[in-house]
Image (cartoon, helix red, strand yellow):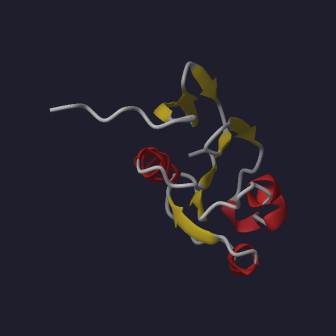
Amino acid sequence: MDRDSTPEGPIVRGFRGHGYLVADRYVPGGLKLTPDDARDWTATDVATLTIDDVADLVAMAPPPEFILIGTGAAMTRPPVAFVRALEAAGIGVEAMDSKAAARAWGVLRGEGRWIAAALLPF
C-alpha cells in the first residue's frame, strides 16, 4: 500500500486554545484558507458576516467551487443575505462548526478541489 501524499497548500494540523495550527504556525483566532495561502481573519461572529468579509476569497482566480464557512464552536447558519450574495457570485456555501470545516478542508484539498475556507474562532 502507498500512503496518499499530503495535499498541496496549507492544511490545518491541529487546534490549540481557540485557534489553529497551520504548518508550523499558530493562528490564535479566525483563519482564511485558499489552495495557496493561510492568513489570519478578524471576523468573530457568524451573525454579522457580509460578502465583504470574504471578498478576497470571492476574487480568487479561478473562483472557488464553494467556501467552507466555519461558524465557531457550534454549527450556526450564516445570514441569508451573506449566502445569497455568494451564490449570486456563482460560489456555493458549506457551513459547519469550525473544527469540522478545518477537517473537511484537508479531505477536500486532498481530492484536489479548488475551494476556500473562512473559519471563525471556536
- Of residues 38 and 110, which is closer to you in this image? 110
Q: Residue at 77% x, 44% y: name it.
A: 42
- Of residues 1 and 12, which is closer to you in this image? 1
Disc count in the image? Answer: 0
Q: Is residue 46 left or right of residue 55?
A: left
- Of residues 106 and 13, which is closer to you in this image? 106
Quarter of the picture containing the N terminus is top left
Q: Is residue 19 left or right of residue 82?
A: left
Q: Residue at 61% x, 44% y: name it.
A: 35
Up/down of 67 relative to 117, above or below: below
Residue 119: x, y in percent? 61, 49
Instruction: Find residue 60 and report its image quarter.
Output: bottom right
Q: Residue at 75% x, 64% y: name it.
A: 49
Residue 52: x, y in percent? 85, 61
> Looking at this rendering, what residue extends furthest in the left direction?
1
Q: Is residue 80 left or right of residue 15?
A: right
Up/down of 27 relative to 89, above or below: above
Residue 43: x, y in percent? 75, 50
Q: Residue at 30% x, 35% y: name it.
A: 4
Q: Is residue 53 left or right of residue 27?
A: right
